[in-house]
Amino acid sequence: MSTQTKQPAILRLKHAAAHCGFSTTTLWRLEQTDPDFPRKIRFSARVCGFRREDLDAYLQRKVEAA
């Protein structure tokens, strides 16, 4: 049995930034300028998030390209 807590499938902006190791400003900037960066999912006017799997895939592509 794993002792790690499972992260939710949808990460709010602050948690998405922390998951990637970015600041929230960098997350916003990447979303605006990088066409490969995953798009956020908007749930309401004030609530949005990112799929954890999309963020992981984006980071993996960046590592492979380096």
Image: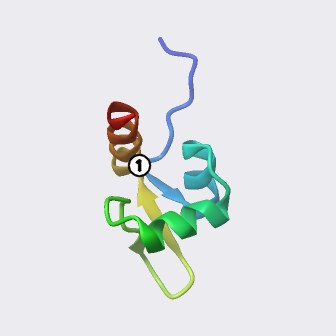
Q: Coloured how?
A: rainbow
Task: Give the image location of residue 59, x and y in percent.
Answer: 41, 41
Instruction: Pick the residue in front: 8 or 22.
Output: 22
Check disc 1 and report the residue beneath it.
55
Q: Quadrant of residue 3?
A: top right
Task: Give the image location of residue 45, x and y in percent.
Answer: 51, 88
- The amino acid at mark 1 is Leu
Instruction: Pick the residue in front: 64 or 11.
Output: 64
Looking at this rendering, what residue extends furthest in the top direction?
Answer: 1
Residue ID at (33%, 32%): 64
Looking at this rendering, what residue extends furthest in the bottom direction?
Answer: 45
Instruction: Pick the residue in front: 44 or 34.
Output: 34
Q: Check disc 1 and report its element: helix, strand or loop.
A: helix
Residue ID at (41%, 49%): 55
Q: Is residue 3 left or right of residue 33?
A: right
Q: Is residue 15 left or right of residue 50?
A: right
Q: Callout 1: few (<14), some (14-19), or many (20+) C-alpha neighbours within 10 Å? A: some
Task: Give the image location of residue 6, x and y in percent.
Answer: 50, 33
Residue ID at (67%, 56%): 23
Residue ID at (55%, 45%): 20
In the rendered image, the quadrant that contains the C terminus is: top left
- Please say if 49 is above or below 16: below
Task: Give the image location of residue 11, x and y in percent.
Answer: 51, 55
Number of marks in the image?
1
Q: Quadrant of residue 19?
A: top right
- Please say if 63 is above or below 9: above
Instruction: Pick the residue in front: 26 or 56.
Output: 26
